[in-house]
Image: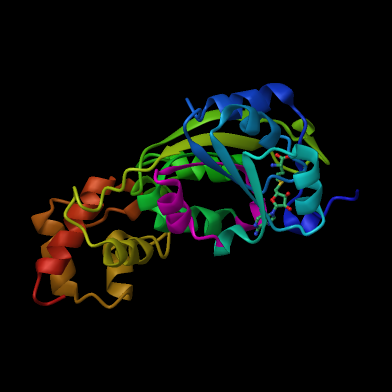
């Protein structure tokens, strides 16, 4: 069957990688696992042999029925649907547990999928995901590094991430143009602990990272924060005025958010 490049179809052929991905989920013997984009079932087959239950979300209407026939397991439910429309909270409530997520993601919608998972974090325990290597670099980046930015902050606010391993294009059929990296994400949102409101904080993050070449202060002024309020917030948080957002840890960004929020001028 021809693959559909528009759906990001690069099927994993490396059996060692498949075993490492499933092993990275830890003990799944009592776990409902949701697989994003099962494709031809490379990962799904092994999942089915180890997990308590597997929910596989496949958009391709030709692949979904083939997968059902190929797996033929009562443990696996294949939904022919867009992952971005899936109700993870309802699935978690139905399973009566937080879900584990796995997926060799369709790269054309990596960011929307990560945001969808972040928004569903209360129903999720952990995820093991394959993404383009450069995207993984940004996800796990730490403050001060070239790759640290809005994606790092957004993902890491929902829990710690670890890079696991990288695969060359030849591990897939057809081979993609890029290397791919698997990372693990343990869902443990930090908003409450840091005293933050989720959406207003994420909005501030988008504002401070809006223009990479501008200083933090200039990005804030461009987002219409009064100059006095910006200066006062930088002073009270001891953030140097010439700093760029790329230098700030999650904790420093949180302090900045609280200082701006508490300033009556802003
Ligand atoms: N898991 C398989 C593997 O590792 O061989 C396939 C991975 S392939 C990179 C991505 C899969 O996601 C494809 O099967 C594709 O049809 C599916 N897909 C693409 N867009 C999707 C969407 N919006 N929702 C669910 N699945 C999608």
Residue 159, given in percent of the width and then of the height, sits at 35, 42
- Compared across the picture, whether 252 is left or right of 57 comes to left
Residue 101, given in percent of the width and then of the height, sits at 52, 42
Residue under the image location 65 percent in, 60 percent down: 81
- Give the number of callouts: 0
- Residue 19, by quadrant, is top right
Residue 105 part of the magenta-drawn span: yes
Q: Is residue 240 visible?
A: no
Tell me: residue 174, above or below residue 112.
above
- Compared across the picture, whether 179 is left or right of 140 comes to right
Residue under the image location 19 percent in, 58 percent down: 256
Residue 52 part of the magenta-drawn span: no
- Compared across the picture, whether 87 is left or right of 157 comes to right
Residue under the image location 80 percent in, 54 percent down: 5
Residue 190, given in percent of the width and then of the height, sits at 26, 48
Q: Is residue 3 visible?
A: yes
The magenta stretch is 86-109
Residue furthest right in the image:
1
Position of the C terminus by quadrant: bottom left
Tell me: residue 123, above or below residue 173.
below
Closest to the observer, 41 or 250: 41
Residue 30, given in percent of the width and then of the height, sits at 47, 31
- Compared across the picture, whether 6 is left or right of 219 comes to right
Closest to the observer, 115 or 166: 115
Tell me: residue 135, above or below residue 150.
above
Residue furthest front in the image:
74
> Which color mode does the image show?
rainbow
């Amino acid at each position: 069957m021809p693959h559909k490049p528009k759906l990001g179809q690069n099927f994993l052929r490396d059996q060692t990688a498949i075993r490492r991905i499933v092993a990275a989920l830890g003990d799944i013997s009592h776990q409902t696992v949701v697989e994003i984009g099962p494709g031809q079932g490379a990962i799904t087959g092994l999942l089915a042999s180890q997990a308590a239950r597997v929910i596989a979300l496949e958009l391709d209407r030709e692949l979904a029925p083939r997968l059902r026939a190929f797996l033929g397991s009562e443990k696996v439910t294949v939904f022919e649907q867009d992952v971005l429309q899936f109700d993870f909270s309802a699935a978690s409530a139905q399973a009566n547990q937080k879900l584990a997520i796995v997926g060799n993601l369709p790269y054309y919608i990596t960011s929307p999928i990560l945001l969808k998972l972040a928004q569903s974090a209360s129903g999720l325990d952990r995820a093991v995901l394959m993404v383009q290597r450069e995207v993984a670099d940004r996800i796990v980046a730490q403050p001060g590094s070239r790759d640290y930015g809005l994606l790092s902050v957004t993902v890491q606010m929902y829990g710690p991430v670890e890079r696991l391993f990288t695969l060359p294009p030849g591990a897939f059929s057809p081979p993609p143009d890029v290397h791919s990296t698997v990372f693990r994400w343990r869902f443990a949102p930090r908003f409450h602990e840091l005293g933050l409101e989720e959406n207003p904080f994420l909005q501030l993050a988008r504002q401070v990272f809006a223009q990479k070449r501008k200083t933090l202060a200039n990005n804030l002024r461009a987002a219409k924060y009064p100059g006095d309020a910006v200066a006062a917030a930088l002073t009270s948080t001891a953030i140097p005025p010439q700093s760029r957002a790329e230098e700030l840890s999650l904790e420093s960004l949180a302090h900045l958010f609280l200082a701006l929020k508490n300033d009556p001028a802003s």
